[in-house]
Amino acid sequence: MTDVTNNIHKRNWPSHRQELIVAILIAIAYLCSMQHRMGLGNQWNLLFKPLRVSICMGLFIYWGISVQRRIINRRLKDDLMIIDGMVIFWFAILTVQDYFVIHQGMISRAIWYGSYIPQLMIPTFMLFAAMHVRRADSYRLPGWTWVITAISAAFVAGILTNDYHFLFFRPRVSVDMMESYYVLMPVYWAAIIWIFALVAVSVLIIIARCRTPYSLRAARLPLGLILIVSVYFLLYFAVPSDFSWLMGDRSVALCLASIGIVESCIRTGLIPSNTGYDKLFAAMGMGITITDDQWHIRYRTDSASDIPEEMLKRTMYDTVPLDQDTQLRGFLIRGGYAVWEQDISEMAAVLDRLRQNSLELQERNYLDEQTYRTVSSLRQAQEKNRLFNRLQSETRSQNESLHRYLHEYRETEDEGEKRKILGKSAVVAAYIKRKGNLLFAGEKSEIITTNELYLCFQESMQNLELLGTECCLEIHIPGGLRISSARRLYDIFECALEQLLDGCSLCSVTIGDRNGKIAFLMECESGGELSMNEYPEVRTERKDGIWRIICRIDDSAGWEGVRS
């Protein structure tokens, strides 16, 4: 266990060393900006200015590269890379102003105004990144997020056009002067409040979506950074001008704070990343030992036993018993070997119980045993045949359609047409499969959960998307419903879908509860014809090329079953 502990500490040390190096670099950059206060002349600018710019720009670029390596979710990674790009852009225009632009005039003021583009866009994309946390790559932001973007864009546009209305900054003397000669207007403070609100909401969303243990404890770091930034911002404007130099460069501080807040969420596990495998390995409940090619132990989980080298080598040829309840298994991996301990206590207990049962069964009448088995097998076969025949009867038309599609697939030579036929086959096959599931579920209970109904429609729509159809599904039925109602809804959906399958570009299904009745609405954009005569409760209408299938099913008995 000593080797394992040392290995884990060795692997943890580089992460702490990395944080220490970053802190030292930030401190050096801060001291570089204090050269005049340190009594150094202007001749030191040739050393300290480039050093400060190199340190800050290097940190920003390195963080972006690390995000590329650590974050797996593509959309989350894109949002974080935009944040990093905005930070680099922010620091770059400030550097250009510091090196090449006189701190007065139209160009310098344009750079000052332009610095508010990243200041407002970074919190906006931080919110978008938070909404992509623990979501699939296919997740799309909801439509209301355009309101967030519009508000941020409105603030940006207002600041860029401030010279025409002075709603954000009002000059004290001349419009050609810099920020210190302007009065901050109420709309400016509204923008600042908007920025802090976006950052705070982003962190709260990340915390709320975290499913790991001690997530609230991990949230103390990003929330603490937000508090520090807030205090820094207040002090920046509250400290007398004679001591304002102690606050350093506000823009650089906010750039570092933006990245620091996101990085703290990654380091604490609030944002999932492709790191921490050593800690996960050590905490595994299974005893695993990893060695190199020479059978020297390199890693071992906390629950692993101290196994001799000779016993480890034997696992490459066969399973090796470690004790009465544990056996060792080995596997060749790249660069070494992996040996894990398999708990066979339950298996041994089961085998012992089986031996006892076998002795008891041998003492019983052999003829009665065989008769019981025969009758039981016959009943099971009859029940399976009954369910199978019922499924065949209720899905006869779909089976015929499936055979027809497969025949068309073998006959056609066009690859595009083949893919289309396979898509249709997948839709029909999904219905047959899920119809069988509903049928078997009905044999056990008269009530089905909403989640099971959702899975039926979801699988059909996922296969429908293979044809390029845009699908949308919403089911709002708390608790559950009768299995007969569920089958009826699914049959109506399939009947309409089969008729409108060709050329269907949009399919939307909404199911909800209306005072004990199940309301069903299906909308399909298709040029096909639709007839629902076999379902008298269904009403159909067509407008602007979109078919609407509407019906209501009484499910009051289903609710009583769920409540009971």
Image: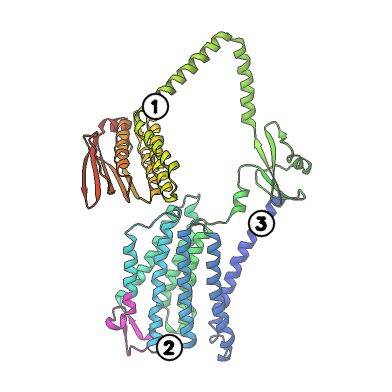
| Color encoding of the figure | rainbow
Q: Where residue 243 sits: x, y (%)?
A: 46, 82
Q: Is 36 within the magenta?
A: no
List the residue tagged with mark 3. Answer: 9
For residue 360, above or below residue 27: above
Task: Classify mark 1: helix, strand or loop.
Answer: helix
Task: Classify mark 2: helix, strand or loop.
Answer: loop
Q: Where residue 438 sits: x, y (%)?
A: 37, 32
In the displayed structure image, the side of residue 324 where residue 207 appears, left or right:
left
- Identify which residue is drawn at 40% across, 44% down: 421
Name the residue type under label 1. Lys
Disc assigned to residue 444: 1
Q: Are marks 2 and 1 in contact (CB under 8 Å)?
A: no
In the displayed structure image, the side of residue 374 where residue 341 appears, left or right:
right
- Tell me the magenta residue range: 157-183
Q: Earlier in the sequence, mark 2 or mark 3?
A: 3
Name the residue type under label 2. His
Q: Residues within 10 Å of mark 3 (few under 14, many from 20)?
A: few
**Rendering quarter of residue 108:** bottom left
- Identify which residue is drawn at 31% across, 78% down: 168
